[in-house]
Image (cartoon, rainbow, N blue to C red):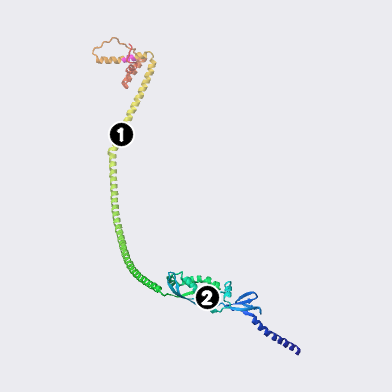
Amino acid sequence: METIIGTVFAVIGTLFIIGIPGILIAKKLIYIAAPNEVLVFSGRGGYRTIKGGRGYRVPLLETVDRMDLTNMIIDVAVSNAYAKGGIPLTVQGVANIKVSGHQPLLGNAIERFMDKDRRAIMKIAKDTLEGNLRGVLSQLTPEQVNDDKLQFAEKLLEEAEHDLSKLGLVLDTMKIQHVEDDVSYLDSIGRQRTAEVIKQARVAEAEAEALSTQREASNNQSARIRDLEAQMKILEADTSRRVKEAETAGGAMIAEEIGEVHALIAEATEDIRVQEARVEQVRLRLQADIIAPAAAGVEQQQADAKGRAAKIIEDGRATVAVLGEMIATWKQGGESARDIFLMQKLQGVMGSLVDTIDEVKVDRITVLPGNPDSRAQQAVTLVEELKAGVGIDVPKLLDRVTGGSSEG
């Protein structure tokens, strides 16, 4: 047991003796870079950089340097820097620069500032910025420099960026604090600007006063318009009331006129009825006094005409019958029918002659047979009956037919 304990203490003692020097040696060889610095390990034919980390230096072969990356504030001032137009200006400003922590600008900074302290770096940066400031001033007028310092600073940043990048520096900001001149040019511009501002202020005041007056007039006009609109509404309401009253009165008048018209229509209708009754009365009177007697007369005349027509028709029928019998008797008489007819004709002629002539000489008288049933006697009797009954003179008719010639 004692042997084991002794062995342990021996090992611990050995490690303690060996470890303390090892730790001291490692501390000399291990380098840690802060966030705002860069470690530069140079030797063995070149250099290497570590930013924000740790590195191991090779003993006897490498050396380690630190480069600060923190911001550097530089006051920049130039005097008698001629602006565009030949006006000398004095410009004061402040710049914020730092060493770039990125390649390739970091390499440029290591090459130029590895063995220089911060004051040397700030002096080099200041000289560079003042040279760029004079170059930018020569491109701008005093008015531009004085009026827009922000634009002036931006143009200075653009101009200085190229030169500073060659040095491995970065210009973060550049502000122009003061600009003045020895010939009071800017003062005169200031007075002119002041006069312009005063003028603009007076113009603005006049415009404001005019605007106020205009607004007051507009308000008065609006108030007047509102009053007129109110009056118009009152007039419209009054007019509407009058129109309604007129419409009501008009409706009453129209109703009254319509009543009168209806009364006239009723009166006219009643008068029409009276006139229609009178017309009917006159019609009935005319019917009784004129039309009925006339109709009766017409019917009587029609009856008489029908009687006469019937008599004529019967006479015609009798005549036709007699002619038919005569024709039949004529046909039965044969050859003696003509002689009998001529004798009958001569009988009439002789009677006429006897009545008209006082002295008549009769040469010959022919006496027909006295048999009443003979054909000749029947023919003579028929001729006499026709002449006496219907007025037909058969001998005369035959005489016309034969052309008036006679045979004895």
Q: Quadrant of residue 276?
A: top left
Asked if the stretch drawn in magenta spans residue 355, the answer is: no
Point out the residue furthest to the left here.
358
Question: Total label count?
Answer: 2
The region drawn magenta spans: 341-345
Mark 1: few/some/many CA within 10 Å (<14, 14-19, 20+): few
> Horizontal and vertical percent for residue 33?
60, 78
Who is closer to the viewer here, 139 or 26? Answer: 139
SS assignment at label 1: helix
The three-letter amino acid code for the residue at tag 1 is Val
Identify the image quadrant of the C terminus: top left
Point out the residue furthest to the top here.
363
Who is closer to the viewer here, 134 or 303? Answer: 134
The three-letter amino acid code for the residue at tag 2 is Ala
> Horizontal and vertical percent for residue 390?
32, 22
Q: Which residue is identified by label 1?
A: 298
SS assignment at label 2: helix
Q: Which residue is identified by label 2?
A: 125
Left or right, 62 with reference to 156: right
Q: Main secondary structure of the magenta part?
A: helix
- 155 over 339 or under it: above or below: below
